[in-house]
Amino acid sequence: MNASLKIAVALLISLEISFTKSISLNIALIVCAIIYLLFKQVNWKLMLYSIFLPILPAFGSWSSLYFYGTGDHVHMAFVLFTRIFAYIWIGSCFTFTTNIDELLKSLEQNFRLPNTFVYGVLAAFNFLPRIAQEVKTIRLAARMRGEVLHFYSPQIFFKAILTSFNWSNNLAQAMRSHGFAEGERRTHYHVIKIPTWNWLAAAAILIAVQAFLFMSPFN
Amino acid sequence: MSVLTTHNLSVAYQEDATPIIADVNLTIDAGTFNLLIGPSGSGKSTLLKSLAGLYPEFGGYLTGDIRLQGQNINDLTIIERVKKVALLFQNPSEQFAMTTPFDELVFTLENLQTPPAEIENRALAALEFVGISNFKHQNIQTLSGGEAQKVALAICLAMDSDIILLDEPFASVDPTARLELLEKLQQLQQAGRTIIISDHDLAGYADIITKMYTIEGTNLVQVTDPTSYFAKFTPTPATFQPVTTASVFELNQLSFKTGTRTLLQAISLPIAQEKFTLITGPNGVGKSTFFTALTRLKAYDGQISYLGTDIQKIKLPKYVREVALVFQHAEQQYLKMTVMDEIELSLKHALHPDLWTTAKIDATLDQLNMATLKEHVVYQLSGGQKKKLQILLMLIIGTPVLLFDEPLAGLDLASVQTIFALLTTTAAAQKQTILMISHQLSGVTQYFDHHLIFDNQTLTYEVH
């Protein structure tokens, strides 16, 4: 499915379950998400990550309501517990099957996001690995001068910020000299079109969620 | 016919500051090859960035005007401008926004509103011309300096710019790749493009340039007798000795690779103590990796011993006090704000503090033409000054072995001579061993005792 539509559907469902109290809907969403990810043959290590990462926050929310809550607190404890897993797995459906490139380019072409934002973010993502490398180099260079810098030393942050500042300025100049102009019309080598079935699928998913919510015998 | 003219062009960093270059009246004819020389920090980059239209947008305060084919540069849109004039930057790794050469070309052509159907063909043709079609989908950060500059040139070509400006494009490019690039530039010029290039190393230009300019003080002047300049860059015959004296390092069946690619096949050889050893070889062959092995930053096979002890058996904090690396980019070595702060930090860890009295520091700064810059912020120094300071800082620490990775890139001949004068006297006084990787050989070979050539996965001493 188109990246922009996929993130829109994921956000809408997440927003909706923030206000509903249906444990069964949360579980149904988690199961659907797992089936989708298995179908997409996502790396099992990433899937394990999505199982273990939410345990602590989910358990924390559950226990604070279960033990210290008032009113319908036992039900709400399980709603919160399943809700956190649902958030993570719905998010996983998006992040594990889409890359930032597809999303930004689709937002640019299909939803008219300003090109400065699109290419600024893209360039920043391309720079991330270099920043990690730069921090290593800074520590090494310091050691060669007889100074030991720890990961919490302010000098590392100072130097890393300075370097990024310098890079961002150079990058802006490089983009400008490659003809990039703010707000100017651009052509597209890969034209991204959203096929009709994408819209239909998105609508079907959202309707199915409502139907489940209102018609399911479980809450 | 002139393609580029300037009228009383002056550029300053601020509105009321003294200009870096003043009253430039330049007329560049179509289809010419122009070389711009001048000392480090004299304003060559500033001039080229102004001509490319990047200043005043990204700094600098301009007066006077610049005309491209008769049109004032300020009246052109960005797209119209880059189709007339393109700029290739000095640092190859900082001029791309995308991850692969092909993506960067597509990005550029999309910016220029090229019809989608033409994009692929134009991108591929440009890559083909500079001879890097094989790397089109490789990550740009993994390309060598020479390859990255070829990508940058391919982009200028795809943009179809009439004028190509190049700001010291060969600072991190090996001599072979440099000649290939110069040849491509000449072909482009013969096909009608106009080239303006700035460089410190004049080797290879004698037969191809139309005009040569230099910056004297704040003025741009045409050089009327280029021959006298070229004479300084004819290679001086050097003599290199075999290693017969005591060694500081012994390589024993040393080999290393990057990923799955073998860089060095098992080799055993000595490196002479208290001598100057020069290391040369093409871009990407593994010279910097060799230094990372010597400093224990990278795993290798075989053994390296330092003064008879396997370097893996020496504790790291002790070893870094023996063997230190001088980085390729000077700024990476800085930790403080001002020149004097940096010097004081180095003095704190100096191994020969008696040699570095206040008077000696002052005299050395004077020798480096930096006596007035003591309270200056290090990041605001010019490229050449940064390099000189970095080398001084590492010399003050005085480790017995100093490894220099491309310390001469971007330095003019006068600065190179100053640095070597300092290096030879200090190294003798502190009994230091110097290993240096360098592409630039003009005027420096006489300082070295030994020459290691790194090529075809092996290291060999050149003796003659």
Image (cartoon, rainbow, N blue to C red):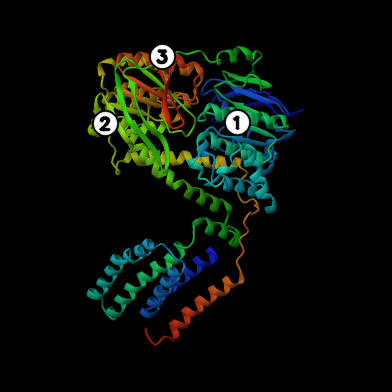
Q: CA distance from mark 3 to mark 1?
A: 32 Å
Q: Is residue B299 visible?
A: yes
Position of B55 with respect to A132 (left or right) is: right
Position of B83 with respect to A83 (left or right) is: right
Residue at horizontal 29%, vertical 81%? A72
- Name the secondary structure under disc 3: helix
Q: Quadrant of the N terminus of chain B?
A: top right
Reading the image, the residue beneath label 2 is B311
**Residue B421 shows which numbered tag?**
3
- The type of residue carrying mark 1 is Leu
Chain letter of the residue carrying label 1 = B
Circle nearer the N terminus (1, 2): 1
Other-residue count near label 1 (Cα within 10 Å), few / some / many at <14 / 14–19 / ≥20: many
Circle nearer the N terminus (3, 2): 2
- The type of residue carrying mark 3 is Ala
- The type of residue carrying mark 2 is Ile
Residue B156, above or below A53 = above
Label 1 with label 2: CB-CB less than 8 Å: no
**Residue B181 shows which numbered tag?**
1
- Name the secondary structure under disc 1: helix
